[in-house]
Amino acid sequence: MPWEWLRHPIVIVLGIIASLASIAALIWAIIARPFQKKKEKATEKRDKETQKILQEMLDEIKKVQEQSRDMQLSLDGIPEVRDRHKVVIYRDAFRAMREYRHKKAIAKFQEALPLASDPSERCAILNLIGLSQIRSSDYKNAEQTFIEMIRIAEQTKLDEPLSFALGNIGLVYTILGKMQKSLKSFMNALKIDEERGNLEGQATDLSGIGNVYLRSGNFQRALEFHQRSLDMAERTGNPRIRVIPLGNLGRVYQALDKMQKALEFHRRALKIAKHIGNPAYESTAKP
C-alpha cells in the first residue's frame, strides 16, 4: 500500500507531538494575549510620558533662551536628544537654570556631561555650565570651563561652539577686568562669526567689544562698536537682538553726560522690551 508508511510508529508520534505543539501554542496565545495587551498599553503610556517630558525640556530651553540676553547660548545636539534618561536630566537642568538655582543647574549639566554623544554636545553642555557659573558670580570656574570648551572646539574644528566660547569667556574677562584678554576673545569670536555669516553672533561680539571700551573709558570707541552692533542687530530682523545695543548706547551717552541722547536710546530699548513682554529684556533696557 502506498500510504502504509503513515502507520509507522515514529510518524504517529511525530504527528501527536505536532498536534500537542499546536494546542499548546493556541493555549499560550489565549493566556498571553491579556499580558501582551497590558505590555502594549504600558509601552504606549511610557511613550506619552516621554513625549511630555521632552516637550517640558524644549519649553524650558525656550525660556532660558529668553533670559540669556548678552550671553551666547550653545545648544547643539541637545534639543534633538530623545533618550528618556538624558531628557529628564536636561529638563531638570534647564528648569533649575531658569529659576536661578545655579548649583542645581551646574550639578545637572555636569551629570549630563559623560552622556554627551559627541564633542559638539559636550561643548554645548560646557557652555551651559559656564553660563550658570557666570550667573552665580563664580567667574574663576567659568573661565576654566570656557577654556576647556575652547580646547575641545579647536581640536575638533567646531567653529560655532568656538565662537560661543570665545564670546562668553570675553564676557568673563570683562567682568574680571582683564580687558586685553577680553578684547582679544571678542575679536576672535567676531572673526569666526563674520566668516560664518552669523549676524546675531556678530551683533553680540560687537556689543562685547563696545563694553570693553566703555569700561576702559574710551567712550568714542564704545559708541562706534555699539552703533555697529545696533546696525548688525537691525539686519537680523530680530527685535530681541536690538534691545542690547540700544541699552548699551544709552549707557555710553550717560557716561558722556548726554542725558537727552541717553534717554532716547533707553526709551527705544524699553519700548521693544515691553513689546516682547519679557522682564529680562525690560531690565536690560532700563538705565
Image (tube, rainbow, N blue to C red):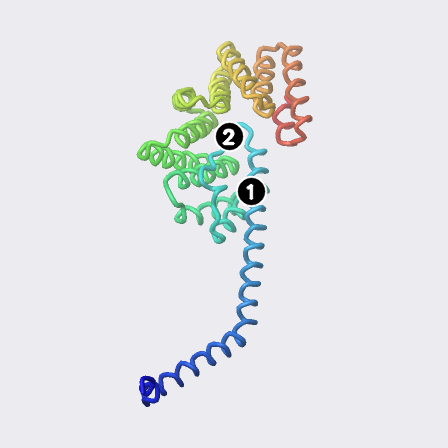
- Nearer-N-terminus badge (2/1): 1
Q: Which residue is mark 1?
A: 58
- Report the number of discs: 2
Report whether 275 appears left or right of 223: right
Kindly state the secondary structure of the residue where label 1 is placed: helix
Question: Do callouts 2 and 1 mark residues in contact (Cβ within 8 Å)?
Answer: no
Image: 199 above or below 73: above
Image: 279 above or below 85: above
Residue depicted at x 45% and y 24%:
177
Q: Position of residue 163 (x, y in %)?
A: 41, 28
Crowding near pointer 1: few (<14 within 10 Å), some, many (20+)? some
Image: 269 above or below 2: above
Residue 181 falls in which quadrant of the image? top left
Separation of marks 2 and 1 at Cα, in angstroms: 19 Å
Q: Which residue is mark 2?
A: 71
Residue type (three-letter) at the residue carrying disc 2 = Met
Q: Position of residue 266 (x, y in %)?
A: 64, 18
Residue furthest to the front in view is: 1
Of the 4 image quadrants, the one containing the C terminus is top right
Kindly state the secondary structure of the residue where label 2 is placed: loop
